[in-house]
Amino acid sequence: MKKTLSTLILTAAIVLITATFSFAEYMAAGADNFPYFHVGVVVIGGLCILSLKQRYEKIYMSEAVGSFAMYALLVALFTNPVAEIVKNMM
């Protein structure tokens, strides 16, 4: 029961972080320049972290959610709108 509950909580966190990433990219880039590939990469990364959490029970929930959040942030840094903002700042 504990393993199922932790998997469901992690799934909810991954879905929420992915939705936040998608919304932020949509607001920054618009519908014409939406980074579909990057959203796909975030989804695949979430599935990998979810499968690792399910396979290895000693991974804490905070570690899994934190690592996925940092992964989504790293992917967001390499999208075109964020790169343009950084370029304009320099």
Image (cartoon, helix red, strand yellow):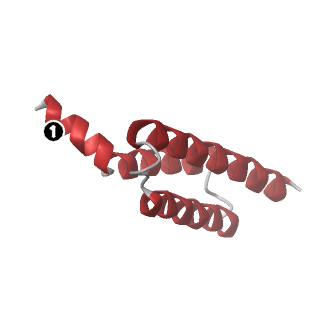
Q: Amino acid at mark 1?
A: Lys
- Using residue 41 as the reference point, say whether residue 13 is left or right of it: right
The residue under label 1 is: 87
In the rendered image, residue 34, in percent from the top left (x then y), is placed at: 44, 52
- Residue 44, image quadrant: bottom right
- Residue 62, image quadrant: top right
- Using residue 43 as the reference point, say whether residue 30 is left or right of it: left
Along the viewing direction, whichever of 56 and 67 lies nearer the viewer:
67
Residue at x 57% of width, y 59% of height: 46
Q: Is residue 24 above or below residue 75?
A: above
Most extreme residue toward the left is 90
Most extreme residue toward the front is 32
Quick one: quadrant of the N terminus? Answer: bottom right
In the rendered image, residue 26, in percent from the top left (x then y), is placed at: 48, 42
Q: Is residue 74 above or below residue 3?
A: above
- Using residue 32 as the reference point, say whether residue 80 is left or right of it: left
Q: Is residue 51 above or below residue 63?
A: below
Most extreme residue toward the right is 1
Residue at x 31% of width, y 43% of height: 81
Residue at x 30% of width, y 51% of height: 78
